[in-house]
Amino acid sequence: STSFRASDVNNRKLLMMEMMQNIGGFRSIQQDNNRGGFGGGAGAEMRHINNRAPPGYAYFVDNPEQWTPLFHFINQKVPEGVDASDNALFECPCTPQRVIDVENGTIDGTKSFANPFGTCNEAFEESNPSCELSTYVGGWRCCEDGVFVLDTDKYDVDALPTDEVYGVFRITYLDGVDARDTDLKPLESLGGDITGSVYTKGNVEFDVPLCEEGTAPEDCIYEMETVHYISGGINATDDTLWEIPYLVGHLHKGGIDLSMYNMTTGDLICRSTPIYGNGTEAGNEDGYLVGMNPCYFEGDDLIVAPANEKVRSVVRYNSTEPHTGVMALWFPRGAEVSA
């Protein structure tokens, strides 16, 4: 979900959150006390994720004036006469209409991506085509607003049927009370990217290659891992102490699980697993990822760690089919511990 706030009632501003489209705009939100946002980047699984703050915590928004959601819909209804698989549409192929300029680092003239190309960790950089623009074939960077995921030289898109779609956000809030006068602790968004490390925040997305011919389907698993700071940052000297009561992963279709381990003990901290639909109704689409299972921590199990504590994350994807532009991100929620 996306929110906007104004801390000065005489100077209220509104700015759409553009974390995935324009990182410059997002940074301006973060740095301006008169406006702000949270959320962004999570997919269809948002419909079946419990995003409720754990007991004793809350998301603080100062003087809210307006809520503005940002939706990203991809029409996957393949019209008669169109030769396109579900994955071809769902995973945002770079169609021949995309103008890719490797020298300038742009797609359709756009360069201000959330994370620039060339930010993968070493393991991904050596093996994954998604890490560099010169080998990029599909993903969210080829899926900007108004872009067709069909080859418009082959199909008359103006003749295709138009669907009307709706989105709903449900937000629970406290009314008539100043949250800062309560015992609630304010939660902030931390991060973590399987393509990142302690040296780079990562590329956000990666490709899953087709498993080798002759491999048994149950053995077709693409597995990658990385070591990163629990905060998702890259500042080795940042020892800010955090309480982390909530962790959830973000995966795409084909994802099996995303796991985080304690680097010192090797113990599993959290394994976030997907929920796949098995029907035809909205929110339960057969074969599609419609939810993620989060991990909650409380009492003696509450995570209390400095921002620069190292953890190891492992992702697994089913590779019986190739995938482009998938993700394996952590969306932790933390409350800073006062010195």
Image: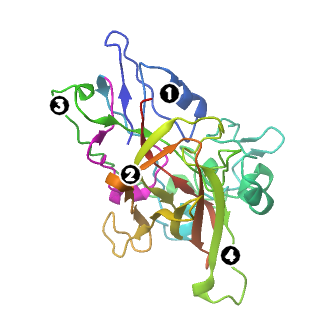
Disc 3 + disc 2, Cβ < 8 Å: no
Describe the element under mark 2 as helix, strand or loop. loop
Disc 2 + disc 4, Cβ < 8 Å: no
Q: Which residue is mark 1?
A: 30
The stretch drawn in magenta includes residue 40 = yes
Q: Which residue is mark 4?
A: 210
The CA distance from mark 1 to mark 4 is 39 Å
Label 2 Cα neighbours within 10 Å, binned few <14 / some 14-19 / many ≥20: few
Instruction: Identify the residue at image location x=49%, y=26%.
Output: 29
**Which mark, residue 175?**
3
Instruction: Identify the residue at image location x=33%, y=49%.
Output: 167
Describe the element under mark 3 as helix, strand or loop. loop
**Which x, y percent locates residue 179?**
25, 29
Vertically, is 55 above or below 184? below
The extreme left residue here reads 176
Label 4 Cα neighbours within 10 Å, binned few <14 / some 14-19 / many ≥20: some
The amino acid type found where label 3 is placed reads Asp
User: Which segment is the magenta one?
Assistant: 38-62
The CA distance from mark 1 to mark 2 is 27 Å
